[in-house]
Amino acid sequence: MTKRNPNLSSLKPTYLFPEINQRKLHYLAQHPQAKLISLGIGDTTEPIAPYTVEGLVTGASRLGTREGYTGYSSEQGMPLLREKIAETIYHNSVKAQEIFISDGAKCDIGRLQALFGCGVSIAVQDPAYPVYVEGSLIHGVKKIEYMPCTPQNDFFPDLQALPPVDLIYFCSPNNPTGAVATKDQLTELVRYAQKKHAIIIYDAAYAHYIQDLSLPRSIYEIDGAREVAIEIGSFSKIAGFTGVRLGWSVIPQELLFEDGTPVIRDWNRLTATIFNGASNIAQLGGIAALEPQGIAEMRTLVQFYLENARLIQNGLKTLPVTVYGGTNAPYVWIHCKGKKSWDVFQNLLEQVQIICTPGSGFGPAGEEFIRLSAFGKRDQILEAVNRMQNFKL
Amino acid sequence: MTKRNPNLSSLKPTYLFPEINQRKLHYLAQHPQAKLISLGIGDTTEPIAPYTVEGLVTGASRLGTREGYTGYSSEQGMPLLREKIAETIYHNSVKAQEIFISDGAKCDIGRLQALFGCGVSIAVQDPAYPVYVEGSLIHGVKKIEYMPCTPQNDFFPDLQALPPVDLIYFCSPNNPTGAVATKDQLTELVRYAQKKHAIIIYDAAYAHYIQDLSLPRSIYEIDGAREVAIEIGSFSKIAGFTGVRLGWSVIPQELLFEDGTPVIRDWNRLTATIFNGASNIAQLGGIAALEPQGIAEMRTLVQFYLENARLIQNGLKTLPVTVYGGTNAPYVWIHCKGKKSWDVFQNLLEQVQIICTPGSGFGPAGEEFIRLSAFGKRDQILEAVNRMQNFKL
């Protein structure tokens, strides 16, 4: 009989967010009247803005016409969308042909893990988005180094302490801590990768939540990054496309494997073989989002969620906790000294019917922390802040 | 420096269809006035029908409203879509919870390959859709058995000659041969898998091109298949969704690994970790396609492409070739005795400016064959048939 893939059996039985959902459903079964507020998973709640949604609607409509119908689009994405990302997001510091359109950052991280295979060693920030580690385990990776990122080191890892690795996952603005790496810190990271011949997988899904213009929005703002870094981007949190599914990855032509093969060549081969492009409707929505009116809409949406984050930060002032993040990021990272993350999760649920994400779900260094997401409807955020005034840690 | 993944370097440099495209572009560069007709890649050309496209348009529009907006949908797919597939496609012989919505069959095959990992041995029909072998190679599979499917064996493999394997990829109606397995043949396949403890990955992407009601449209029409088979389905060729991206996989609860773990459990874990669901707009389009008006539209579309296939079959009658498929399938499989596939490809391109797919691109047993796709606009199909009358093999 077919054996179970040991890479799957090595995982915890449940991915973090389904586990939170199970606990939520368990609580609701016992308290059917409870009015829960979810500040757990980072899921957008505001409608897609008019100009952008019109791009989606037109994209769908034209598929019903003889002139407008299109079948498969290129696995790499529509040329116009790739050009618009190169121009508006990267100010032409990367080329359109280096941008690969995906059905979202999470899915593309999975494909990148298939690209590098099971023989690589990886390093992740601790805490980190679970997909870096769990997706790597699914693809058979055996060597994983955790780089603690805590208030003590300003959420930037001690690279001197890191043993040699092939890939370094780095997320800024960080999920879950909300920390944003400075230009000096990213320069240190790029220099380290150059010196040690590592590849950085730079997750910039929240880049456009950065308001402080001195902070880099892309790893390619650092000299030399094109030789060492892949960058992942997403429309999910800036255009409300979590359900629409659209993102991209940048693979610069200068990025090479040890034998001199350009990484972009193997990536082209892999995506042509086991991917078939993002939905053409989503891509036409993405094109609209990158036109001037769409960009203005995205800015407004980002401001809305950042105002949520500010309200949450303020609401926490009376509690005996220390608050991080939430200024250039949609996540607020809360240190509840001496408390276990899952205990705080359960207390918040039972006392004030608020769902958070327990920090330990993001890695060992997340213990004693919880993450609150600023994605939510305004009345729910205000109500959550109100309820938290009565919360006893 | 990071080493290249040997699983990628083991592949031919180019996937089949991009290679065809390169040859096409090369020809066009030399003959800029040429009016090429592509019967190569199986890409839909008819607009999406009115009721179904309205599902997509409404699905997109509602994302712009406060009441209709939704963020992430479940990784497994929208419950209503899963129920509709269970009901209309499977007449409730599978449960909604066993159906997992994907962004298309090709992408889901890639994820299934990650599910089973590199330690499995596989068997594929020869010729076969290249993704079975190449996706397996990408995921590190080392043991691959080819099962010749030729006119001599009625395109059904000699299972007695097959060494033990973990997974058997089987596609019916077949891409590229257009052959459809009979109920007896599928029963033999299922009995073989039961006896030898193999798992069948049954690609039913073209199932609804079957017009002969005595031929099974699903592996689950065979008793016992639920214990041994995964089935893959797609909206691409029945609703014109090649660019929209929507499909599904069925993982029956009875399907177990050697240690008794249900395959569905690991599949849930994998999709939750490295997938984020198909586009919500595509899913709402899929729901419309499965309502009575949508189903009627799909039937009409299938008839249109099957009429194309009949026209191609007729058009080939004067040529010294033997023609297979094209009756319950959108592909016509043509034996050009004594000729190399790529030579026929090049001759067709140069003599009559028609693009086909060379059979050898689907595996060694495809040599001497070419595949013509019935997906195309009617005037183009008629013009192609006309041109072929002057074709010298």
Image (spheres, coloured by chain):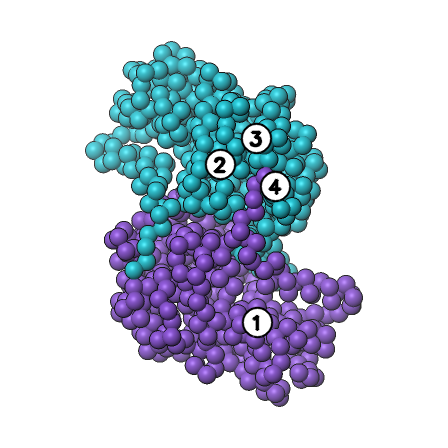
Chain colours: A cyan, B purple
Q: Residues within 10 Å of mark 1 (few under 14, many from 20)?
A: many
Mark 4 or 2, nearer chain start: 2
Q: Which residue is mark 4?
A: A250
The spot of residue A187 in percent (x, y) is: 62, 25
Q: Residue at x 49, y 36 (%)?
A: A122
Q: Chain of mark 3?
A: A
Q: Is disc 3 in the same subunit as disc 2?
A: yes
Three-letter residue code for mark 1: Ser
- Mark 3 vs mark 2: in front: 2
Residue B89 appears in the figure: no
- Mark 4 vs mark 1: in front: 1
Q: Residues within 10 Å of mark 3 (few under 14, many from 20)?
A: many
Mark 4 or 3, nearer chain start: 3
Three-letter residue code for mark 3: Ala
Q: Nearer the viewer, residue B67 or B285?
A: B285
Q: Does dot 2 land on a helix, a strand or a loop?
A: strand
Q: Is disc 1 in the same subunit as disc 2?
A: no
The spot of residue A113 in percent (x, y) is: 49, 44
Q: CA distance from mark 4 to mark 3?
A: 14 Å
Q: Which residue is mark 3?
A: A207
Q: Which residue is mark 2?
A: A122
Three-letter residue code for mark 2: Ile
